[in-house]
Amino acid sequence: MKAVVYTKRGLPDKLIYRDVEKPCPGDNEVLIKIVAVSANAADFRSMSMGIIPKKRIFGADIAGRVESVGKNIRLFKPGDEVLGDLARYGFGGFAEYAVAPEKALILKPAKISFEEAAALPMAGITALQAMRDKGNIQEGQKVLIAGSGGGVGTFAVQLAKYFGAEVTAVCSSKNVEQTGSLGADHVIDYTKEDFTKSDRRYDLILAVNGNRPLFAYKRILYPDGIYVMIGGGLLQIFKSILFGWLMSFGSKKMCFLTAKSNQKDLEFIAKLVEDGKIRPVIDRRYSLDKTADAIRYLREGHARGKVVINVG
């Protein structure tokens, strides 16, 4: 099969499109013929940190058809259309075929395209768990989403509105119109206004790759407000984990989220898309042989939503 393989000798992006051996499913695995896969920051950040999958194939968010199943598989059968997150199971999505345990997958709703399905798992679940689980979002709350233009941010705006919050979103000038179309009540262009110096206060702040000082975010929280940081560089993450804990003494809480994919949450997100409550925003599409270009574009930090790679 064809796959995109990480190798230190691959220039300039260490990703090479080549033939590799097609995987065989174990007794507890499903073999998926991949139709679409989306790229995530987790891919290039893992590369930067030297965290390389055993088979040297990245790609977590997949959508495709079941080719065959192991003898212990009960939830799926050949021909089923599925989607899932392989991040906790060795990645492998940048390829024509991948294997996964059945707990990594759900059935793809018929109304959702393969592209849309591939755009859901990591970004959608991250946004959901950040607001619902860490942020304890409630109807009528004032929510600030800093970084509303990317994959997680576009889902976060829509989910916050679904939960009944008043949403203020922060993005660059090029994303103002898109963010407004997703339902944000107020949109702040950070190139024109420093939202951390405003007199406005929020019950929940979701910082996608938060690049402002923690004290600045804490200042604009209401008493009993919650700040949740998602992603970011290693230094940002370290500061959020260390100093966020120290700054959480008192009524305002500062925390960092590491999302954990599961079937229940993935089915919840997929159902919202199927019912038209939210929608994935897809910025660019690439073919499998252009995966290195997709990762390079995503790494630049200017993606407006998700970047999807069409395989089948």
Image: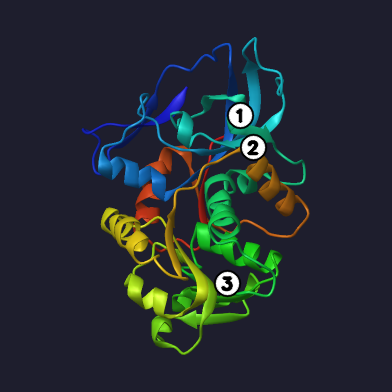
- Residue 263, label in figure: 2
User: Mark 2 or mark 1, which is nearer the start of the sequence?
Assistant: 1
- Residue topped by disc 3: 178
Left or right of residue 272, residue 248 in this image:
left
Measured Cα–Cα span from mark 2 to mark 3: 29 Å
Say which of 203 and 208 sits in front: 203
Measured Cα–Cα span from mark 3 to mark 1: 34 Å
Left or right of residue 275, residue 196 in this image:
left
Q: Nearer the viewer, mark 2 or mark 3?
A: 2
Marks 3 and 1 close (CB-CB < 8 Å): no
Rendered position, 75 above or below 196: above
- Residue topped by disc 1: 103
The answer to which image quadrant residue 141 occupies is bottom right
| Residue at x 66%, y 17% (from the top left corner) | 73
User: Mark 1 or mark 3, which is nearer the start of the sequence?
Assistant: 1
Rendered position, 54 above or below 243: above
Say which of 82 and 75 sits in front: 75
Few, some or many residues within 10 Å of mark 1 (<14, 14–19, 20+): some
| Residue at x 64%, y 45% (from the top left corner) | 265
Residue type marked 3: Gln
| Residue at x 62%, y 56% (from the top left corner) | 280
Measured Cα–Cα span from mark 1 to mark 2: 7 Å
Q: Secondary structure at mark 1?
A: helix
